Amino acid sequence: MHAMTIGRPTADLAARLPLPFDAPVSTAKTTIFRLAGALALAFATTASVGAQTTDLVFAVTEGVTYQATPKDIRDKFEPLVEVIGRALQRKVRLVLVPAYNDLRVGLASQEYDVAFIHPAHVAMAEIKTGRYQSVAWTAGYTEYTVSLMSKPDQPYKELKDVKGTVLVTPDPDSITAVMVRAMLKSQNFGAKDVKVITTRYQDAVPFYLEYDFAQVGATAANAVVKEWTAKGADERNKLRDALIALSQNDAGRRALAVSGYKGFVAPDQALEVSTIAWLGL
């Protein structure tokens, strides 16, 4: 990486390409890596693309680290299918392919004429083979970024500072995780320098930081970064205090009466951690 700076009070570790190593703190915010064409729209180079006698097969993979249902994805892409069909004067068949490995198999055998692919590393691997070519990049996603987050009391100011930590990323086959591995490799970090663990979804990463399962968390979800930096521990503590104090004021007692609960007590994080481990979660 060309620069590494400290961000907002929650110690949002950051870097941006192509800044120099000695860039001042104010020049970078929450970016750790930039990747052009994070969502690639590609088409097959086979003769079947130009054939008019069969349906054009349009595959869509929206990634594994965001919680969208098949219906959500289909509803999102059906209007685009209609536009493509009118432009090509062909019937277009939409195929949802949620799993990356299933997509890789289909691409390898050129089952799809057109594929909208998130994440980028899957699309670019196919472009490298020559089986597919890039048609268009998705506007707004051409500077895909990954942010590293940590608690406010962590002293991380440069990437080298995370050596010896546990770093959590979303799904290991997500573009976020792939970019993090590339970033660590670029800094000559070995497997023993940083322990990388994974969770399925982007928005699960903060949990690992809050409960000390990891010291550093990687995410590409702007909403996750925004919530982490904007709210942090202060809002969590205010919420806890308000809930614990419900039984001590009239408004709180009325709220408890309606809810049917007697009140709330402070959580025991050590007990939570041991329970999670015991349950095998």
Image (cartoon, rainbow, N blue to C red):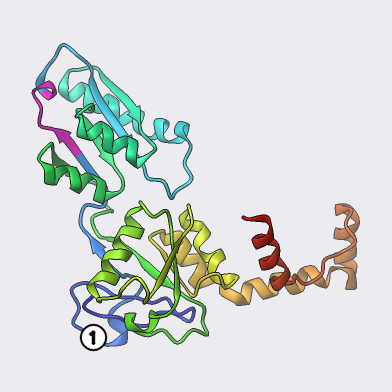
Residue that appears at 58% across and 71% down: 210
Q: Nearer the viewer, residue 230 or 95?
A: 95
Classify residue 257 as left or right of residue 137.
Answer: right
> Residue 75, percent across and down?
42, 31
Quarter of the image containing the C terminus?
bottom right
- Judged from this view, the residue extending furthest toward the top is 53
Classify residue 240 as left or right of residue 215.
Answer: right
Q: Nearer the viewer, residue 90 or 47?
A: 47
What's the residue type where badge 1 is placed? Ala
> Residue 60, percent across and down?
32, 35
> Residue 152, percent across and down?
51, 82
Task: Tell whether position 44 is magenta.
Answer: yes
Quarter residue 241 falls in: bottom right
Q: Which residue is mark 1?
A: 23
> Residue 42, percent across and down?
18, 38
Classify residue 36 as left or right of residue 264.
Answer: left
Mark 1 surroundings within 10 Å by alpha-carbon count, few (fewer than 14), some (14 through 19), many (20 or more): some
Please say if 42 is above or below 7: above
Q: How many marks?
A: 1
Task: Tell whether position 209 is magenta.
Answer: no
Please say if 155 is above or below 251: below
Quarter of the image containing the N terminus?
bottom left
Residue that appears at 29% across and 71% down: 184
Please say if 83 is above or below 150: above
Determine the secondary structure under disc 1: loop
Q: Nearer the viewer, residue 75 or 179?
A: 179
Residue that appears at 23% across and 17% down: 55
Magenta range is 42-49
Quarter residue 144 falls in: bottom left
